[in-house]
Amino acid sequence: MTNFFNWWVIVISLGNIFACYWLIKWTMKKRPQETEVGESTGHAWDGVEELNNPLPKWWLWLFYITIVFALVYLVLFPGLGNYKGVLGWSSASEYNEEVADSKAKYDPIFEAFSKTSVADLAKDAKAVKAGERLFGSYCSQCHGSDAKGTTGYPNLTDNDWLYGGEPDAIKQTIMMGRNGIMPAFAGPLDDKGIENVANYVQSLSGRKVDAASAEAGKATFQAMCVACHGADAKGNKFLGSANLTDTTWLYGGSAGAIKKTIAKGRSGKMPAHKDFLGEDKVHLLAAYIYSLSN
């Protein structure tokens, strides 16, 4: 925090506290004797007159206590600009302590699981349950709590894998992440060319399309698409290119969605979790994901 904002926070914080004290003193009236009645506010209704009586002493002291508490708190804890407080507490230090305690408690458990293969762990109910909790914390935001994904995020419960569904491939995906890129062809192809290729792609999975358009699209596909998707259009796991002959579509399999994919391309990123989770947790997480489709 810059020096200006450091003093800005200090002045605003302390100014508000002392302003509250001043307001109490300014509005406080001399407490009447036991037999006296507070002065009238001038408001009366149905024979009932509103009186301006001071606050009860116990209530007034509560206000003073909150002011003292605020000042003591700001001495002990950070709250005044760059001042760190007498106790030296910080949210970062507390987080690091909690992480250290968690590692000391749970790392031996994950380490024990890591000595068993992913395939064997997938058959261990206890390991699968632990992996499910990891998935709920770190993966469900994208793939859903049921792991069935949504548009742009793969379904992990079927047997359709862009980069392979073997244990080592799944673990590699989680560890290092993936960057999937489908280039846009709106420049090299005109609208008719895109429609032809889209018709050909739809025909690969048995759909009824315009035969002449699909035939024209086939020639374009063989010239521009086989390098990634292969001559048989079944994709390439080394590149993460999709199999176009089945009925599984990451970004939607409607005619419009396919045309949009061809025209504008697609870009997908699976973040790497190696540094964040560590290999032992990734190993257990891979076992859970492997169990979903096996």
Image: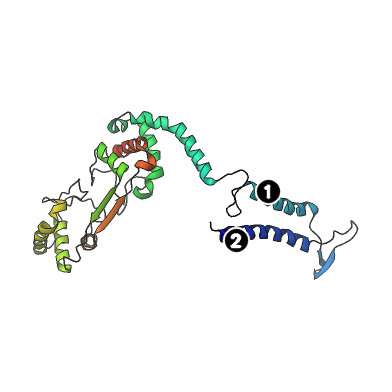
**Residue 187, position in %: x, y?**
19, 66
Which residue is farthest bottom? Answer: 42
Going from N to C along the chain, the mark reached first, 1 or 2, is 2
Residue 76 as seen in the image, left or right of residue 112: right
| Colour setting | rainbow
Q: Which amino acid does label 1 sit on?
A: Val
- Please tell me whether mark 2 sits on a helix, a strand or a loop: helix
**Residue 272, position in %: x, y?**
33, 45
**Residue 124, position in %: x, y?**
34, 30
**Quarter of image, res 219:** bottom left
Spatial CA span between label 1 and label 2: 20 Å
Give me the disc on residue 72: 1
Residue 101 as seen in the image, left or right of residue 71: left
Tally of numbered tags? 2
**Quarter of image, res 286:** top left
- Please tell me whether mark 1 sits on a helix, a strand or a loop: helix
Residue at left 20%, top 61%?
262
Q: Report the residue marked by disc 2.
A: 8
**Residue 122, position in %: x, y?**
31, 33
Residue at left 13%, top 58%?
224
**Quarter of image, res 50:** bottom right
- The answer to whether marks 1 and 2 mark residues whose Cβ atoms lie closer than 8 Å is no
Residue 16 as seen in the image, left or right of residue 141: right
Of the two numbered discs 1 and 2 in the rendering, the one whose residue sits closer to the viewer: 2
